[in-house]
Image (cartoon, grey):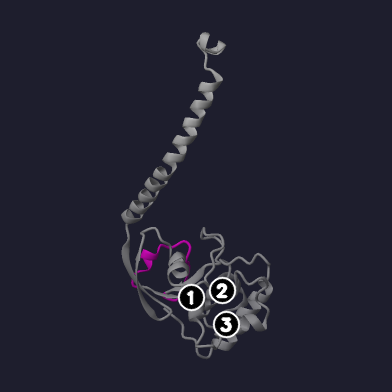
Amino acid sequence: MSKDSKNGGISRRKFLQGVGSGIIGTYVLTPTIASASEKLTKNAEKLKLTVPVSMTVNGKGVHLQIEPQTTLVEVLRNQLGLTGTKVTCNNGECGGCTVLMDNKAVYSCHILALDCAGKEITTIEGLMTGEKLHPIQEAFIEHDGLQCGFCTPGQIMAAQALLLNNPKPSRQEVLEGMSGNICRCAAYPSIIESVLAAAEKTSGSTTTMK
C-alpha cells in the first residue's frame, strides 16, 4: 500500500486509472452524443414553420414556402437566384438592396417577403430586354456613374423609380430622389449626371405612374 493510500489520499496508480476510464468513457459516448445532436437538428428542421406566399417578380409569378421572418432580399437572392440585388448594410439604411415594389423603390432587406404578397417586384435583372441594357443602365456606363459597382444595382433601381414617377426631373429633384442611396466611393456627381442623361433617353416613352 502506498504512503498516499495510508494517509487517505489517492495513489498515482488510482489517479491514472481514473483518467484512463474517463478517456475511454468519452470515446464511447462521443458517437452517441453526435447521433443525438444530429437527431435534434433534424427535428428542429421539421418543426420550422413555413407559410405560402405568391408575388410577381420581373413579370413572372412565383409561389414559395417561406419562414415568416424571411426578408424580400433573402427570397430574391437565396430562393430565386437573383443576386444582382446586393445586401450591404442589411439594416435599411444604405439603399444597396433597392428594388421596385409596384413601381416604388423599397429596401428589400427591410421588408418581409410576406408583405410583398400579390405585389409586383422588379429587380435589376428585370430591367434588361433580352441582352439589351435598359437606357438607365446605358447612361450609368456612358457617364461613369459607378466605381466599385457594389451599390450600382440599388442606384439604378432608385433612378428607375424616380423616372417612372417623374420622367423629366430637375437636378434638385434628382438629388432628392437619389438621396436614399449611399455610394461609399462618393461617385455622386457622375450618378446625378447619369440619371439626368437617362431622363433624356427615356422621357419620350416613360409614362408617369400614379
- The residue pinned by badge 3 equals 136
Residue positioned 51% across, 22% down in the render: 14
Counting residues from the start of the chain, the first of labels 3 and 2 encountered is 3
* Viewer-side residue, 164 vs 184: 184
Task: Check disc 3: other Cα within 10 Å, few if <14, some if 14-19, many if 20+.
Answer: many
Please provide the residue range marked out in magenta.
102-118
Residue 10 appears left or right of 39: right
Mark in front: 3 vs 2? 2
Q: Position of residue 87 (x, y in %)?
A: 53, 64
What is the secondary structure assignment of the residue under circle 3?
helix
Residue 146 appears left or right of 75: right
Q: Is residue 18 magenta?
A: no
Residue 75 is drawn in which quadrant?
A: bottom left
Residue positioned 56% across, 60% down in the render: 89
* Viewer-side residue, 4 vs 83: 4
The total of numbered circles placed on residues is 3
Label 1 close to label 2 by CB (< 8 Å) = yes
The CA distance from mark 1 to mark 2 is 8 Å
* Viewer-side residue, 196 vs 98: 98
Q: Position of residue 83 (x, y in %)?
A: 51, 71
Residue positioned 56% across, 20% down in the render: 12
Per the rendering, the mark at residue 21 is none
Q: Is residue 117 magenta?
A: yes
The CA distance from mark 1 to mark 3 is 13 Å
Residue 150 is drawn in which quadrant?
A: bottom right
Per the rendering, the mark at residue 123 is 1
- The residue pinned by badge 2 equals 153
